[in-house]
Amino acid sequence: MTYDDLKEFDGETYAGMRVGGRHTWRYTDAVWRERKVSPDAWEFVLTSIKRRDRSAPPGSGAPLGTQYHWYLLAHQWVRKIDADSYHTFLSGVKYKVAHKRPQWRSWSSGYPDGTSETERVIAILEESLADLRTKAGRAEPLLAVDV
């Protein structure tokens, strides 16, 4: 079956890569793996080492070994530039869901006064949806990028 052939998934007809198909993309110092899960949805994992542009001031920042759980809401624009490459632009917001200090037994969300990670993500999505609905009511466009 080719890319442009019509396919069906859960009663929806679509063209493009088959549901269940996978890609691995290599960015400079990063790997993005994705799997198509429906005609318009992909699951993805990005792994990378994140490095500061400039060295951190002495004594600043979190202690070594501190971990963070962030939730991202983003737009990704891509433009195909050859058979195997796309120019990519990703823009969005990130929210802290939880953190874990090196000496802690649990994440901040696991302590009695902590909000569960699921509750925090639900709150983020509800706030984001309310904001998006407000912008839609004012006919504000989403960020448009020409890549």
Image (cartoon, rainbow, N blue to C red):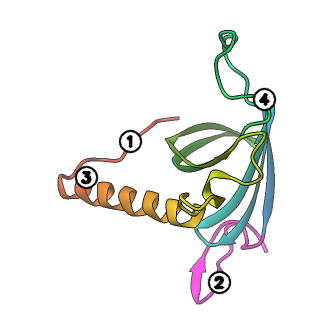
Residue linked to disc 2: 9
- Residue 33 drawn above or below residue 102: below
In this view, 27 is above or below 112: above
The residue lying at 71 percent from left, 67 percent from top is 36
Which is more N-terminal, label 1 or label 3? 3
* Extreme-left residue of the structure: 138
Nearer the camera: disc 3 or disc 1: 3
Q: Splitting the image into 4 quarters, where does residue 42 fall?
A: bottom right
Which tag is nearer the camera, tag 2 or tag 4? 4
Which element carries disc 3, helix, strand or loop? helix
On the image, the x and y values in percent for residue 1 come to: 79, 75
Displayed quadrant of residue 59: top right
Q: In the image, which disc is placed on residue 135?
A: 3
**Local secondary structure at mark 2:** strand
The x, y position of residue 46, in whole percent, is: 74, 46
Marks 2 and 4, how far apart at CA: 46 Å
Residue linked to disc 1: 143
Q: Name the amino acid type tagged 1.
A: Leu
| Alpha carbon separation for disc pair 1 and 4 | 36 Å
Q: Residues within 10 Å of mark 4 (few under 14, many from 20)?
A: few
